[in-house]
Amino acid sequence: MNLEEMKCLGWLEKELNKLTETDLDRYGPQREVDSMEDESIIGVIKSIECKKLWCIANRLKEEISELRQKHHREHIAGSPSKQDCERVDREEIILVSRCRAATDLFWCAVREKMKKVNPQIGVRKGWKLVSVPHEEEIPDITMIIPIFPGHDPGQSSSPTFC
Ligand SMILES: [Zn+2]
């Protein structure tokens, strides 16, 4: 293992440079403000960097889901080798870590701007920040790791993240 060329932010710089205006529309928040649910607008996100972080996390979620579905199909079609299962698990751990990092950076930036601590906030279409009556139900992507019959990466298939 050669750790000399190790970079922490290389992937993020690449992703930030790659995203276009069209991507911001496609991967940006789609949910409308729900006034029936007592959501009230507390601000609008203007920072392109923040928008991009949100979109990067969202796109990574799609990638993770596609990776899982593809591997699931491989299991249905036959028996992938142990090496294939290991490769998929490794890839998934990296994607999940990146997704979490982008999400954390986004929320960190939002919270730094807020005058008081309010854990109940959400992002809606048009990059509107809303306060919500209940805590957002954001599915934890690490909680939905599917168990494929026959999936054998040779280690625990539920990787833990800290
Ligand atoms: Zn597998």
Image (cartoon, rainbow, N blue to C red):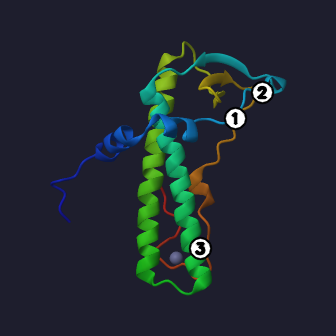
Residue 127 locus on image (x, y percent): 59, 26
> Could you tell me the amino acid type at mark 2?
Asp
Give the residue drawn at x 44%, y 59%. Answer: 93
In this view, the residue in front, 87 or 17, is 17
In the picture of the structure, the residue carrying the numbered disc 3 is 72
In the depicted structure, whether residue 145 falls above or below residue 26:
below
Where is residue 56 drawn, in percent x and y? 47, 42
State if disc 1 and disc 2 touch (CB < 8 Å): yes
Q: What whole-number distance in Å separates the C-alpha atoms at marks 2 and 3?
A: 36 Å
Q: Label 1 sits on what residue type? A: Arg
Residue 154 visible in the displayed image: no
Residue 31, numbered label: 1
Disc 3 + disc 1, Cβ < 8 Å: no
Q: Give the residue furthest to the top.
A: 115
Residue 34 is labelled as 2
Q: Earlier in the sequence, mark 2 or mark 3?
A: 2
Which mark is first along the chain, 1 or 3?
1
Q: Name the residue located 15 percent from the left edge and 54 percent from the top edge.
A: 4
As helix, strand or loop, the secondary structure at mark 2 comes to loop
Which residue is drawn at the image coordinates 41% and 72% (left, top)? 87
Q: Is residue 145 above or below residue 33?
A: below
Inspect this view and state whether residue 47 appears.
yes
